[in-house]
Amino acid sequence: MRVGDALLDLARAGGARSLFVVGTGKNVGKTVVVRAVAERAVARGLALGITSLGHDGESADALDAQAKPRLRLAPGTLVATARNVLPRHPASEILDLSDLQTAAGTLLYARVRRPADYELVGPPTASGIRSAVARLFEFGCEQTIVDGAIDRVAALAGGEDAIVVATGASGAASQAEAVETVAALVRRLSLPRYDPSQPFVRVEGALTAALAARFTESAERHQIVVGDPTQIAIAGKAFDRVADRLALRCERPLRVVAATVAPIGREGYFEPRGFARAVAEATGLPTFDVFAAAMVAA
């Protein structure tokens, strides 16, 4: 099966034209997922735009110098990336320089003219990435892909996007820990819309662990409402404990459409089928092993 096609179908089924790929950590297959979806979008004739919330597509990891998957882009693809990482050979046409800054210099918009490996370095702020995505659409994109980062999840707020969550063996001491982490993240991002006809307490700003503890200690039974799931500053098992005790809701729900797994990590290996099945069962999402081109139904 073509996993890229399946993920693209899931994203566009709800009318979303932007797809965020968010990882539970480093080296969990995000770039491989982005590449698979990008290839199929181009094959379908969609005008594609692509950017990043961090630094992706580099040839080697900045921390340990180990090789990383490259992001090879096809002609016609539009990219929003830092000027200093644009391929130096004549592989792209610069369309515009932005006033946004990245960790590697000024953000620019370019169209790929010849196939090449690209690094993506995007704006570091939620408003910046929103501006970059909007500009890509102004250039005529029909589909955008954002290579995300969990520590900048606030960029998901306020958009009509589809989200794919990637997890893997890297950074997890065991399969059970990896499954718990991705399940808690999906549960947080999938927070349901509140019911305005029922009593609720609106939280201005972020729901922190300290504030959640006060609600728990007072045995609050009303809905606890945040603007969107990104305003919950609690993760992992701590979030699960809070969610089990409080009726957490939001005003602007997000849409998580799938999970992906990378069973081989730098620190370990999980049996692929069993890992994918465990993630599917824990998240309730269609789960894909992009490396094996396989899917496990939720």
Image (cartoon, rainbow, N blue to C red):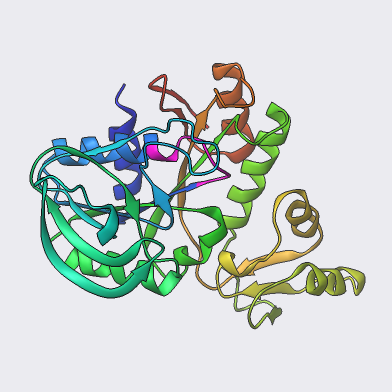
Q: Magenta includes 97?
A: no
Q: Magenta includes 28?
A: yes
x then y, percent, for residue 229: 58, 64
Q: Residue at x 24, y 73 (%)?
A: 98
Left or right: 73 in relation to 290: left
Magenta segment range?
A: 23-31
Task: Give the answer, above or below, for where 219 lies relative to 116.
Answer: below
The kind of secondary structure the magenta stretch mainly shows is: loop
State the quadrant of the N terminus. top left
Name which quarter of the figure residue 138 lies in: bottom left
Task: Give the answer, above or below, for where 115 lies relative to 222.
Answer: above
Q: Residue at x 55, y 37 (%)?
A: 64
x then y, percent, for residue 33: 38, 37
Q: Residue at x 28, y 66 (%)?
A: 107
Who is closer to the viewer here, 247 or 2? 2
Left or right: 46 in relation to 180: left
Q: Is residue 17 visible?
A: no
- Residue pushed farthest right? 217
x then y, percent, for residue 38: 25, 41
x then y, percent, for residue 26: 54, 42
Mark count: 0
Name which quarter of the figure residue 125 lies in: bottom left
